[in-house]
Image (cartoon, rainbow, N blue to C red):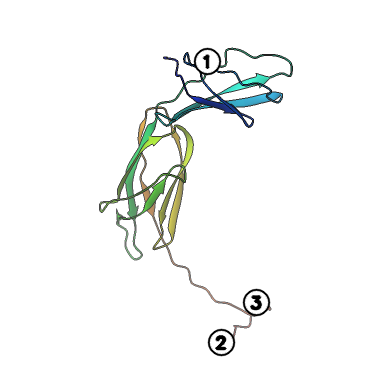
Amino acid sequence: GTPLPGVFVSSSGRGVQTDHLGNYSLQSLPAGMKTISAYDSVTQRSGSAQAPITIGQTTTGINIVILRPSTLRGTVYVVREGTTTPVPAAGVKVSADGFRIVDTNAQGQYTITGVQPGDLTVRFVDQEKRYAVNTPVKLLPGEVLTKDATFRPGTIHGKVFQPDGVTPTVA
């Protein structure tokens, strides 16, 4: 790939920017296996690599590839109580990272562009009805993934008893 200048590279609380050739050097890192992260503020894309750090030694060749962003899209449905047919759910909040949140349209459809690839949890929330669904997904770089969700609310009934488990409570 093409080296990227001006990208922020960080690990263990230390950070630097790449030079005009895309090179970086992080110094004084603690020993152990570390994740080295890179973030390009121009494209808002990121990437990371693992590196073994040994005190007193320089580890070279830890190259980081900035990943192409991905897209999540789909339709959110609700099965209303007393029915069996899903219908589109408008105004549902959808997010893959908790920061970028989109609303479903009148047909229950949503699209989130520029999603960082990886193992994610997509969260669907109808704030008005207090419905929520969490769905794990694996998103590959540059992938357009369709992920639908369906709210299936239900009702429970029961009775409350005194501590003996037999005597009903008195209102």
Q: Which mark is residue 63?
A: none
Tell which circle, 3 or 2, labels the residue nearer the N-terminal end. Answer: 3
Depth check: give the residue in front, 53 or 86: 53
Up/down of 112 relative to 63, above or below = below
| Residue type beneath disc 1 | Asn
**Mark carried by residue 165:** 3
Which residue in the structure is indicated by mark 1?
23
Above or below, 59 against 145 in this view is above
* Side (left or right) of 137 relative to 60: left
Q: Secondary structure at mark 2?
A: loop
Labels 1 & 2 near each other (Cβ < 8 A)? no
Residue 30 located left or right of residue 116: right
Q: Residue furthest bottom?
A: 170
In the depicted view, which residue is nearer to us: 17 or 31?
17
Residue shown at the point (45%, 45%) measured from the top left: 99
Tag in front: 1 or 2? 1
Residue at position x 47%, y 46% in the image: 98
Is residue 49 shown above or below 130?
above
Q: Quadrant of residue 83?
A: bottom left
Residue at screen point 70% across, 26% down: 30
Q: Tell us which disc is closer to us: 3 or 2.
A: 2
Can you identify the residue that label 2 sits on?
A: 171
For the residues labelled 3 and 2, the Cα–Cα distance comes to: 16 Å
Q: Secondary structure under badge 3? A: loop
Residue sitting at 61 percent across and 28 percent down? 11
The Cα–Cα distance between marks 1 and 2, rounded to whole angstroms, is 73 Å
Distance between the alpha carbons at the discs numbered 1 and 3:
71 Å
